[in-house]
Image (spheres, rainbow, N blue to C red):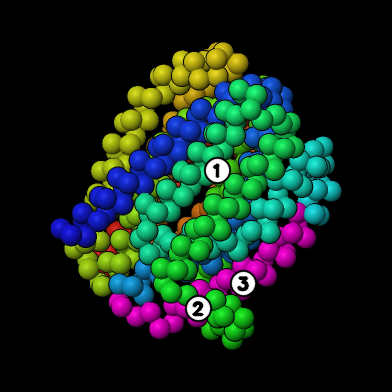
Amino acid sequence: MKVDYKVIRSIFGSTIFKLSGAALSFITVPLLLKTLGTSDYAVWVTVTALLAWLNLFDFGSGYSLKNKVTESYANNDKANLEVLISGTLQFYILMTLILFVTFIISTLFVNVFKTHLLLAYIIYIPIILSFPFTLGHFIIQGLKKFNLFNSILFVQNFFWLLILIANKYKLIEFDIYKLALYYSCLYVIANLTIIICSLKTIKFRWAQIFNFQNFKSSKTSLIVGTRFFILQVSSLFIYSIGNILTYNNLTLNNVAQFDTVNKIFLMGMTVFNVVISVFWTEISHAKALKDKKKLIKLYNQLLLIAFVFSIGACIITFFVPFLIRIWTNKAILISNAKFVYPFAFLIIVQSFAYCGAVFLNAFEKLKGQIVLSIIAAVLMIPLSKLLFSLSVGIGSVPLSSAILTLPTLIYVLFKSKSCINEV
């Protein structure tokens, strides 16, 4: 009961912070639209959408470390934890250099970067240089400090809102470039705070960062991380290129429509991902203790949560055009509700797929997921282009994602049950 109480407290607290953060994000959209105008807003969301790709450069090592942190605390075996963390942090620092070079090269080829070069530099360079700080996300979650983690992210969103409100009332004035500077600075400060809190919790000795033997000692964990990396790459192709594909195939107005509809459904996924994050550590904990009964209970609870979540997604779908009209003060309009249905279908499929995938991630049984994800990623752009040509409109990308996720959904639910039975 005590463990269950902690789980509920983590989910409840994190959900409150996430929903509050999402509410702040909702408020910032009309403020950004008013400040930048529809065209510049479309540019802004397209440029910042590519930030998700930066997470690829940890090559999945963060997820592997997260499992190790939870398992170490479950077994009260913390002897090698500091070595693993320092070795992984050294790897992150190395990847920062590679990431910086990759970004510079990408400005020669990525169309939105070439067209808005200064904006890309202001946003991306500070965020890239702070890349090692993002390891704190995985450590703090492995330690089950979800409420602390999400409260820091909430404060980041809160200050972002304050900046936009200050601009609205002429307390400060800025163009898109100054706005980008504020954005990147808040990102850096938030992530620095997270890693400091996480390393202080485990009483990490900073001198270990300079012990390069730790890099070799953490090799096994880093190798496991490469499997998570492949999943990350394919997931980004399947779920995070909507703005780019819409930008390339439709109009700037359609990009703004896609982004606003997507934000509404992403708020729901934000809440569901809180549940997944909390359950991931609980699954790792139960796995370390070989608690089969607890694993079965967690599996059934997740499926029930996904079912309730799906009903909510269906209900909210009918109100999305109205919500967007009010939310954006008629700056963005959805003329036909049928364009919204693919977004709802996608998050329903995702929610059930995540129920199985989180078990396989905690058990580090990733081979089947990797194969299916690679196939889906390869088919993502051709299928989306086909749906664009069939006039599916802004729903083309989410419908493609949902269709390509269905085989994975079936596989992970059956495979996760098999993993539980083997405990």
Residue labelled with disc 1? 239
Numbered disc 1: secondary structure: helix
How many numbered tags mark residues here? Answer: 3
Residue 181 image offset from top left, x and y in percent: 69, 43
Which residue sits furthest front?
171
Marks 1 and 3 close (CB-CB < 8 Å): no
Residue 176 image offset from top left, x and y in percent: 72, 33
Question: Which badge, 1 or 3, comes first in the chain's sequence?
Answer: 3
92 and 231: which is toward the camera: 92
Q: Residue at x 46, y 15 (%)?
A: 322
Q: Which range of residues does the magenta coloring cover?
A: 75-103
Amino acid type, label 1: Tyr
Q: Which mark is residue 315?
A: none
Q: Which mark is residue 205?
A: 2
Residue density around tag 2, few if under 14, some if 14–19, many if 20 or more, within 10 Å: few
Q: Quadrant of residue 73?
A: bottom left
Q: Residue at x 61, y 53 (%)?
A: 188
Residue labelled with disc 3? 91
Amino acid type, label 3: Phe
Amino acid type, label 2: Arg
Q: Is residue 287 left or right of residue 40?
A: left
Residue density around tag 3, few if under 14, some if 14–19, many if 20 or more, within 10 Å: many
Q: Is residue 270 left or right of residue 287?
A: right
